[in-house]
Image: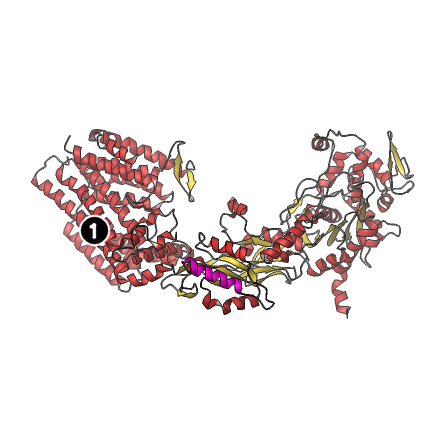
Amino acid sequence: MGSFIAAGLAFIRIDYLKRLALPFYFLSLIGLVIVLFGGGDVVKGAGRWIDLGIIKIQPSEFAKIAYLMAFSYWLSRHPVSFFRLKSFLAPFALFIVPFILVLQQPDLSTALVFTAITLVGFYWAGLTVVDMFLLISPVFSVILSHSQFAYSQIFWGVLICLVALALFYRRLPKALTSFFFLINIFAGYASSMVWNVLKPHQQKRVETFLDPMNDPLGDGYQVLQSMTAIGSGGLTGKGFGEGSQTNLSFLPEEHTDFIFSVLGEQFGFLGAVFVLTLFFLFLWRGLTICKIYEDPFVNLMTVCACAIFLFHILVNIAMTIGLMPVTGLPLPFLSYGGSFALTCMVLVGFLVNMRYQGGRY
Amino acid sequence: MYNASFGNEELQNRNLKVLVLLALIFFFFTIIISRLFYLQYLHYEENLERSENNRLRRVVLTAERGFIYDRKGRILVRNRPSYQIALQSLSLPRKKSEKDSIFRRLLEIRDLNGVQLFDSASLDTAFQRTVWIKNRPIRILEDATPEEVALIEEHSGDLPGVVTLIESRREYPYGTLAAHFLGYTGEISEEQLKQEEFKDYSLGDRIGQKGLELQYDREFRGVNGVKIIEVNASGREVGVIEGMGSQEPVPGMHLVTTIDLDLQRVAEEAFPDSVRGAVVAIDPRTGEILAMVSSPRLDPNIFSLKRRERNRGWAEVALDSTRPLTNRAIAGAYPPASVFKLVTAGAGLEHGLIGRNTHFQKACTGGFQFGNRYQKCWSSHGNLNLIHALRLSCDVYFYQAGLLIDMPRINEFGERFGLGSDLLGIDIPGERSGWLPDSISFNKRNKRNGWRWARGLILNLAIGQGQLVTPLQQAVFIGSLARNEGVFRPHFMKEIRSIDGALVRRQEPVKIREGVMKPETHQVLLDAMDSVVNHIGGTGKRGAVKNIRVGGKTGSGEWKKGEKTHAWFASVAPLDDPKIAVAVIMEAAGGGGAMAAPVAQKIMQEFFYGDTLKKEGP
């Protein structure tokens, strides 16, 4: 079914996509509100589904696509710049509403997908690399100033210097310059303060989220098994269907999110690198669309769709090899699971569409 | 506009941005690939070995279940260690022939008397189950004795995959004592697992299945811990995994009950084993239950035994026609018999229809003519006033009183003091409600068999034949009637304490019914109860305790023609400030004054003189 949708989407005129962007966006917001206020079925403790009788839809998946369209559409007509702060107003509003709704579900990882789209979109629509650095520097401030890592305080100092340097180079308006500088300092100090105010069980929750190995009752065991499985694959793997770890059902079936560890065990390092290469080629081919056409809507759609793919790939694989917290983000094209597979096909449909119709306008 | 001028510069800009993005992707992929290299190449050997026999185990550390204490801190229920011999599927050899040799070796193991430890049929089943149950041990010998454990450990070298586990099981040191309300534990059943309220339990958990064990299971169970260990090829633990945290179990909380062990023991001894029935002793000031007996007895220890013995014991009690599994004190519904005359009298007094010195037209000549029916009394009492009628439990007097007062008033008075169809809400499952019929509820209940309400039924109901009460209700009733300060919810829970003895929760008295009457009514009823026990001619004189003003009322419930009556005795003491109320029912035992009153008397004796007796004792 997904393939048909993808094929169908490839033939839709880009004009229609532009026109439908905002209506779709508001429709998706209604969907998100419905699941939030009890309309949805409860799956795994968090209500994320709407049951339409024939099919169940997951509004947050729908919202990803709708947001992608609406956000691209807006930015394509109104590029952003730090020298015109008003230009951020509308896109930020577009972003923050679904972000908060999804966060309330609560589904942090999907909310972060929205963030990834937004950041990449801003970059494409006018910001420079230095601007992007300034934009995300407070996050690094929080991490570095609070890390258990030995010299992190020094690194934080270096970071502050870099921020200062960047600000000096960009010569942003005075208000914005002081804002970026102060927010970094503030983030560094406030994070420790907030941390100390947190109750022990809240601290523990954050810690186990960041380091699942510390939580044997929760996901730690899964991650350990997954890492063992991948590690035991060696260079060439155990062969298809030969994974002792995964065959013995240590990884419960519902965790198709851990599909990469099956792959790593059965096909080894070479297999994993092969899959990563395919992903890289896919993203590369996707991004080259932007080189061909000038329509900013086409370019933004392409870049942001690639951002969705990239974010899922990185977070999912990093989770199976113990580099990142366990989140529910599936691996594109490989994880079994209706809703996201459909999203992937829709995105592929968009990319094909952009590739072949991007020139027409 | 954005692309107003598109030229070389714009294209260059786009190319640059694409390049930056690709570089970013490349950077992230490099990190992933180096991590894969680290896991799959540098740590290959280690990970391969771990995965080979699946050397990683997630071991659940079962939390110690909380104890049950009596009100003075004496242990009623505790835990004992129990050894389980089990098959660890993942450590068993994969080859069929090697598996078979372990099977044979297990069969060869005999104890000192030369009896086989395992029988081949159940062992075979266990081996077959190892094929699909991988992640938890499969028990082959439940609750093994230390000798049996020693035998297995002796052969452990030849028996890879056979492991000994230590569990904690419930022990009831007093056996049948208090078994009915303490309850017992058992493995959670498949049906329970499907229910919403048990959704945080998992297969193999032992949970409370009845009584207090069930009611306070969440307090008792604590929080299970877990650790992740590495095992060697034969399934024995070699160590914990580096960098992997573990979760210590949190022991369950202790329950301090309102039960008085001495009183419970006396009640158990006073109530003969051969008789079916129940005893409830309660503190009417708070609703605290001091003792509760249900007969026939039940030994909850059978539920902690190994399966074969447990099944045998279970079959015995489940198929017994006297139904020892029922807690008659809360689930036995009996006619209240003459004890109910207190309600009839109270209702009359409360509405001013009768007074202390009311005499009725017809004297008791051994019976009463109502229409074409002749209702008997158990003796000929002559013409009596209210106090005398209660003392002698004269039926004829109350036939006439009942007709005068009518059921709605009588039932309202009974309900005020805890009788009737509303549950009292005791904190163990299985409580049954009583029934106080009036014309409406009688017709509704008997719709199917076509019985209709008739005024003549009032005769029976006025003397307590036809209603249903539980022994618990009877005790609550007599207690609150004597105190006239309200009905309090009967309960067992006094305190919940944490493992180190800190108070977690305390049960405060909860008033569930208004339970008050006019002081004049109260006084007449107290005098009547007093004279039942302490007057030389009273029916309940065997319930008297030296120097204590005990009040009470006897009852002899007819239930089947030709059988002996159910013996009831409900008493309360001391009358000027009641501290204890006792209800005793003995099924088909005879008259209440003769049979049940002595049981209540022993309990009262212990309650008031138990401590002094012990001090003076040998």
**Quarter occupied by residue B242:** bottom left
Q: Position of residue B308 (x, y in %)?
A: 60, 56
If the image is split into quadrants, where does the C terminus of chain B sit?
bottom right
With respect to residue B11, does B42 lie above or below? below
Q: Position of residue B408 (x, y in %)?
A: 74, 34
Q: Which residue is mark 1?
A: A133
With respect to residue B566, does B206 lie above or below? below
Is B98 magenta? The answer is: yes
The outermost residue toward the left is: B8
Task: Label the magenta part by its dominant secondary structure.
Answer: helix
Q: Is residue A67 visible?
A: no
If the image is split into quadrants, where does the N terminus of chain B sit?
top left
* Residue A115 relative to residue B240: left or right: left
Q: Is residue A304 visible?
A: yes
B573 vs B24, nearest the viewer: B24
* Residue A105 relative to residue A270: left or right: right
Task: Give the residue displayed 24% in from the left and 35% down from the top.
Answer: A349
Identify the chain of the residue marked 1, using the numbered disc in the image: A
Is B371 magenta? The answer is: no
Task: Give the residue displayed 71% in from the left and 47% down from the top.
Answer: B321
Q: Which residues are magenta?
A: B94-109
**Quarter occupied by residue B353:** top right
Q: Position of residue B211 (x, y in %)?
A: 62, 51
Amino acid beneath label 1: Phe
Q: Secondary structure at mark 1?
A: helix
B78 vs A138, nearest the viewer: B78
Judge the density around disc 1: few (<14), some (14-19), many (≥20) Cα neighbours within 10 Å: some
Task: Give the residue displayed 23% in from the left and 31% down from the top.
Answer: A17
Q: Position of residue B10 (x, y in %)?
A: 11, 40
